[in-house]
Image (spheres, rainbow, N blue to C red):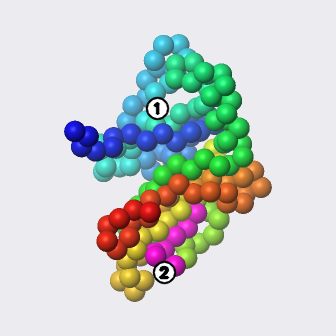
Amino acid sequence: MITKMSHATVWVKNQQEALEFYRDKLGFEVDTDAMIGDDYRWLTMRIKGQPGFEIILMEPKPGYILDEESAAQLKSLMEKGVLGAGVFEADDIYKTYEELKAQGVEFKGPPTTQSWGTATVMKDNSGTGSASARNIPRNTTSRGLISVIAFDPAGATRGCFAGITTAGGNSS
């Protein structure tokens, strides 16, 4: 029986640059950084204080996992800005937004409140981004999620891969 999800992949243009972004700007920790053979780097990061779930920072290149055609297709999708990467939760979305912005992280705009929660869109250094949202009454908390969405090269939002928690605990 499957008991939990332990890893999720974020496709990146350059693993070392992505490591530095997620570690130095977002405050993640390196969990595993190991070479498998001569040309495959297994690089995972985790949020401090959250053991048991790792984000795999993976370059779409042929070799250990991908063939030439699949690697080229993934690179093309990344260049178009149509790959999203997930959702990150923040205790205080407004404070987190200000802290990350001060670290040089790019956002589409400040957090905004919708009927379903509060959200913002963050862009990582590979063109993948992140939005914040949480369905908690507007006047009780500023908790939020930072979910990863894709940007096109001109910076326009193209698509979103985000599980937004609803009042009933469902995801959409």
**Amino acid carrying mark 1 in the image:** Leu
Label the magenta part by its dominant secondary structure. strand
**Residue 96's x, y, as percent?**
47, 65
**Residue 85's x, y, as percent?**
52, 49
Name above or below for residue 144 compared with residue 76.
Answer: below
7 and 140: which one is in front? 7
Give the left or right position of residue 45, taking residue 49 as reference: right
Q: Is residue 145 something that shows in the picture?
A: no
Give the left or right position of residue 49, taking residue 114 as reference: left
Q: Secondary structure at mark 2?
A: loop
Which residue corresponds to the image point at 67% horizontal and 41% vertical from the top-left?
77
Which label was assigned to residue 115? 2
To which residue does mark 1 refer?
43
Name above or below for residue 166 compared with residue 127.
Answer: below
**Residue 64's x, y, as percent?**
52, 19
Q: Which residues are magenta?
A: 114-121
Nearest to N terminus: mark 2 or mark 1: 1
Location of the N terminus by quadrant is top left
Mark 2 or 1: the one toward you: 2
Mark 2 and mark 1 residues within 8 Å of each other at the beta carbon:
no
